[in-house]
Image: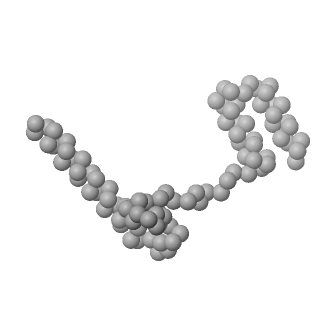
Amino acid sequence: MARLALYALGFIVAVIVANMIVRSFSKSDSNPTDASPKKSSGDSNVIRPFPNSSPAPNEDDPTEKLQKLKQLHDSGVLTDEEFSEAKAKVLEGL
């Protein structure tokens, strides 16, 4: 019984600390309209995730294509011959 109470206490402390961290981030933001999580207009307790701020990768960029091919080759998905052929096609497009 004491072990269960100790686990419950640890869980409660973790929830309180997590809540304090979330609140400290939302208070310290200089521009809350861009950086803070979006709240629903109907329910003030619902927090929406941040909008995707990372740019979408450019699939036409030869550098990114070559890097992806290198990763596939290093992981063993592409053979040496397949890698060379694919690399040549990318470089022909330059």
Task: Residue 34: give x, y in percent of width and height.
Answer: 53, 69
The quarter of the rendered structure image containing the N terminus is top left
Residue plotted at (19% across, 42% down): 7
Task: Residue 45: give x, y in percent of width and height.
Answer: 37, 62
User: Visible in this render: residue 80?
Assistant: yes
Camera-side residue of 50 and 61: 50
Residue at far left of view = 2
Residue at far bottom of view = 30
Quadrant hosting residue 71 = top right
Please indicate whether residue 90 sits to the left or right of residue 4 in the image: right
Residue plotted at (41% across, 63% down): 43
Please indicate whether residue 82 sits to the left or right of residue 12 in the image: right
Task: Residue 9: give x, y in percent of width and height.
Answer: 18, 48
Residue plotted at (50% across, 67% down): 35
Task: Residue 29: give x, y in percent of width and height.
Answer: 45, 71
**Relative to residue 82, is residue 69 depicted above or below?**
below
Camera-side residue of 88 and 47: 47
Quadrant hosting residue 80 = top right
Quadrant hosting residue 55 = bottom right
